Amino acid sequence: MAQKPGNRAALVALGLLLVVGAFFVWGRVFAEDTPGDYRVRKGNYRLEDGRYEQAIEEFEAALETNPGHLGAHLGRAITHGQMGELELALAELDRTLELDPGLAPAWANRGILRDRLGRHAEALADYRRALELDPRLAKGPGYLWRFLRNVGERPPTIADRADYLEAELAKPPAERLLRLPEEDAKQRMYKVD
């Protein structure tokens, strides 16, 4: 029984599509633009799942491959922050900013940590620097990010917090309200895309 020419062409087209798709998936999942990228992606997944020790291990592995990997340094800082190790996280962000002083998410995250540590004037300066470097940070997480993480209400952005701190720091010290625990807990750290 002979195959019809149309069926053969369809099978060839389907085969080519599968091969191209496989290469695309392999390239996005396993190939690295920069040495250490794959481990950073794994670390970010572990971080989002709340598996902090495993996230640190992945970021460390990325840094063994590439000691200057900004995503690994930033991921390690965020993970330490999530673990409540704020001073360690702050030191990691300082190291990240030494490597790349133009990395806006690092300035934003350092501002968040300084804010949590009660170093509000320094936090304000970091927030303003982050927004100067990347004004898109003023928008905060988008709808898709919030949907995927089941966050209904838009969390406060660093622009919101910077404006609030600036207004409060302009008041006499006795009148300042610099901590709003319920609102402060909603603030999210930033990663490099």
Image (tube, rainbow, N blue to C red):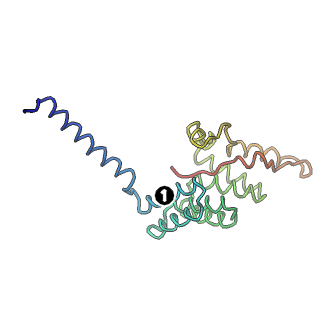
Q: Residue furthest front?
A: 1
Q: Residue at x 72, y 58 (%)?
A: 114
Q: Which residue is drawn at 53% across and 67% down?
A: 57
Q: Position of residue 134 (x, y in %)?
A: 58, 46
Q: Where is residue 132 in the image (x, y as percent from the top left)?
A: 62, 47
Q: Residue at x 63, y 41 (%)?
A: 138
In the displayed structure image, the side of residue 96 where residue 166 appears, left or right: right
In this view, the residue in front, 123 or 37, is 37
The quarter of the rendered structure image containing the N terminus is: top left
For label 1, count other residues whose C-alpha is less than 10 Å away and answer few (under 14), some (14-19) or many (20+).
some
Residue type at the position of mark 1: Lys
Q: In the rendered image, which quarter is residue 140 located in?
A: top right
**As drawn, 134 above or below 121:** above
Q: Where is residue 177 in the image (x, y as percent from the top left)?
A: 85, 48
User: SS at mark 1?
Assistant: helix
In the displayed structure image, the side of residue 31 where residue 99 appears, left or right: right
Q: In the rendered image, which quarter is residue 35 located in?
A: bottom left
In this view, the residue in front, 11 or 107, is 11
In this view, the residue in front, 47 or 102, is 47
Q: Residue furthest right?
A: 174
What residue would you read off at disc 1? 42
In the displayed structure image, the side of residue 150 where residue 122 appears, left or right: right
